[in-house]
Image (cartoon, grey):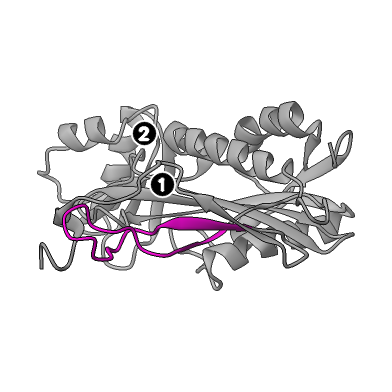
Amino acid sequence: MYYANQSVLLASKHEKEKAIADVFFKKLSCTLCVNDFDTDQFGTFTGEIARALSPYDTCVSKAKTAAKHFGYDLAVASEGSFGPHPDFHFIPSDHEIMVFVDRKNNWIIAEQLVTSKTNYGMITLNSTTELSDFLSQTGFPEHALILQTNSDKTVIAKGIQDIETLRAALDIGFKKEKELFLATDMRAMMNPTRMNAISELAEKLADRIACPCPHCHIPGFGFQKTMGSLPCKACASPTSFYNHEIWGCIQCKYQEKQPRKDGLQSTDPQYCGYCNP
């Protein structure tokens, strides 16, 4: 294994080592190290500090900044974004990005995961709002909550994990405003469902790091883009479904065409612009 017995710095303050350390050790024989590094400087979910860069660039910046600060050649970082699912807009999704940075070789190996397995949710409430359904849907108290003012989203309390703390925070909030904003706390250590997604993505990234380029043999060979269009089963017209994947090397220009992982070779007429305009 290319990185066997090396130390990798995790750029995180939210206990993500619980989801990543065992995966990196088992699959890459790497030891994950965690130092006191404030990743909130790159942006917070509650908006006190705005995320100035894209999720990917933020992730890379986290890893490189932490690695340089603590003197590591290798670092890993992740970044999550939450909102409507890209394919099914009526359900929420978690979009996780994770990068592995090799400063010595100037390599970046990245993977991403989009999943509908998230408790992401929010509600605007007043003093008479019934909260039982929202608390049940968001997995409270195993999953923490954040309470903010509704007008300017000033944080009243984070990491709320019991009903007494929630009631106390609501009492404080309603002395400030008549309406408040209650949302899921999406920080990894406060959200077991998100921690599971990070662990799943760590597996995906570790597998990619362990995959060498068939041409130059450096790590990180894997998915780069999709190409082509699957034909409609009924009329053979091209559809919006991609036909195959292109895998490539992070350093040389070598690429390979790979079939779809789901094995599809055509799509139903409902996805065809000609059959179902």
Q: Which residues are magenta?
A: 224-247
Does 70 lie within the magenta span? no
> Magenta part mainly helix, strand or loop?
loop
Quarter occupied by the N terminus: top right
**Left or right: residue 54 compared with residue 109:** left
Residue 248 appears at what percent x and percent y? 66, 59
**Left or right: residue 98 compared with residue 135:** right
Which residue lies most toward the front here?
235
Residue 105 appears at what percent x and percent y? 87, 60
Residue 140 appears at what percent x and percent y? 32, 30
For the residues labelled 2 and 1, the Cα–Cα distance comes to 9 Å
Label 2: element kind: helix
| Image quarter of residue 104 | bottom right
Label 1: element kind: strand
Q: Residue at x 51, y 35 (%)?
A: 195
> In the rendered view, would you say 210 is above or below 251?
above
Label drawn at residue 157:
1
Q: Nearer the viewer, residue 120 or 245?
A: 245
Label 2 neighbour load within 10 Å: few <14, some 14-19, many 20+: few
| Image quarter of residue 64 | bottom right
Label drawn at residue 265:
none
Q: Residue at x 46, y 39 (%)?
A: 194
Which residue lies most toward the bottom here?
52
Label 1 neighbour load within 10 Å: few <14, some 14-19, many 20+: some
Q: Nearer the viewer, residue 252 or 231?
A: 231
Q: Does the residue at mark 2 contact the one at mark 1 (Cβ under 8 Å)?
A: yes
Q: Which residue is labeled 2 in the image?
A: 165
The residue under label 1 is which amino acid type? Answer: Ala
The residue under label 2 is which amino acid type? Answer: Thr
